[in-house]
Amino acid sequence: MGLEAGGKIPIFKGMPDGTPSLAIRVIDSLKAVRPEDWNSCAGSDNPFLSHAFLSSMEQSGSACPDSGWSPHHLLAEDEEGRLLACAPLYLKTHSYGEYVFDWSWAEAWQRSGRAYYPKLQCAVPFTPATGPRLLIRPESQANAPALMLSLGGAMSALCERAGLSSAHVTFLPEDQAVALAGQGWLLRTGMQYHWHNDGYDSFDGFLAALSSRKRKSIRKEREQAQRLGLTIRTLSGDDIKPHHWDAFYRFYLDTVEKKWAHAYLNREFFHHLGQSMSDKVVLVMAEMDGTPVAGALNLRGGDTLYGRNWGSEGDFRFLHFEMCYYRAIDYAIAHGLKRVEAGAQGEHKISRGYLPSTTYSVHWIREESLRRSVSFFLEKERLAVSRSMAELAELSPFRQEDHGAEGADSKP
């Protein structure tokens, strides 16, 4: 497709700090960049952007050409080859595992006799968690706006060069979305449910901020979960053994089967994760008579706990709420984290303290006719998302005198 690994895409000359030139190189594997260089750009706040996490995706075969995720990561380097910025980028042959849906765009384009796939996707595979996608080295922050636009320009240039339909940057923070929108990318908003730590000293402190009815409901759910006769433990680091990952993989497959979904992640991925970054893993496991029967996988960032996957072998009422939501809140309070992001979908999370929060994506469409249609659709969708978030905020379980709808991020 004209996207040769190692090829350079000249963007501009005369960087604001006096750097004479910048080139952006395409690599087809994270093995081509030193972990310390990539991580110097990615930082330590978001575990999904680390070299270890993205490499686990690649080395396990979960994100690779055979799975429809061909790595085409971007490295922005100066004339001496120093890495200034980078971006996780993939050539996609489908739209699975993205959580920002463009199936209708693909169908419309293909009905006109043209190919929507392959496309470019700047994202963390199979991970609907917000975080920077245009990764800037701290020493280059003075030039961050120019570097971000250079990375965005490189993606559109790759589309033009290879005749691709589009490029998409998903679950990026608002400031990066606005910057790329100013470059002509189309802005899209979505919604997730996040729990915010308002300085609680305990779970009971959190409950005290809720209305009486919601407080009683949550206590009842937790009591019901405790009566299941299970032992629930929260594991991290060396406490997580290979047999825990084997069990969790079974739980993951069980959830996939129940939802008629696709098993994006394989057993090797979970073992890679345990070997390379177990200190970032928070694994909640439930056992019955010493045998694991359910699990919830979280990853810890600088100030956020990210809920990712869940599964169980059996029908345990209220166990999902206990392990995925309440244990996550327990952990966040105990470790002074500001937020829990519980993943995509689920209005039922609102009554449990997880309030609507805006997510962002941006989209570059090569053909003007498709671009106009998508732009019209997104304008209407943004209004609908904004209205929906305002309505859902009214369902907040918090006492109005304490929170009202303040915990919801309802920006259009």
Image (cartoon, rainbow, N blue to C red):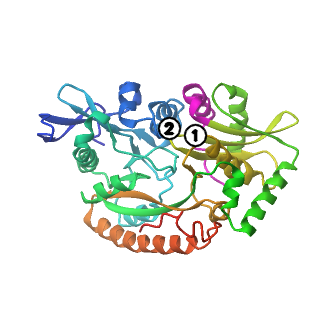
* Front position in the image: 92 or 174: 174
Label 2 or label 1, whichever comes before in sequence order: 2
> Which residue in the structure is indicated by mark 2?
47
Q: Main secondary structure of the magenta part?
A: helix
Magenta region, residue range: 260-281
Residue 359 in the image, given as x and y percentages of width and height = 46, 58
Q: Is residue 118 magenta?
A: no
Placement of 224 over or under 126, stated as above or below? below
**What is the number of the mark on residue 249?**
none
Compared across the picture, whether 310 is left or right of 381 comes to: right
Compared across the picture, whether 287 is left or right of 355 comes to: right
Residue 13 in sight from this viewpoint: yes
Crowd tier of the residue under label 2, counting other residues whose Cα lies within 10 Å: few below 14, some 14–19, many 20 or above: many
Placement of 233 over or under 160, stated as above or below? above
Residue 198 in the image, given as x and y percentages of width and height = 57, 55
The residue shown at (48%, 33%) is: 58
Using the rendered view, name the quadrant where residue 24 is placed. Answer: top left
Q: Quadrant of the N terminus?
A: top left
**Dots 2, 1 in contact, CB < 8 A:** yes
The residue shown at (34%, 44%) is: 134
Residue 169 in the image, given as x and y percentages of width and height = 38, 51
Amino acid at the residue labelled 1 = Leu
Spatial CA span between label 2 and label 1: 7 Å
Q: Secondary structure at mark 2?
A: helix
Q: How many marks?
A: 2
Amino acid at the residue labelled 2 = Pro
> Which residue in the structure is indicated by mark 1?
299
Q: Is residue 270 magenta?
A: yes
Q: Secondary structure at mark 1?
A: strand
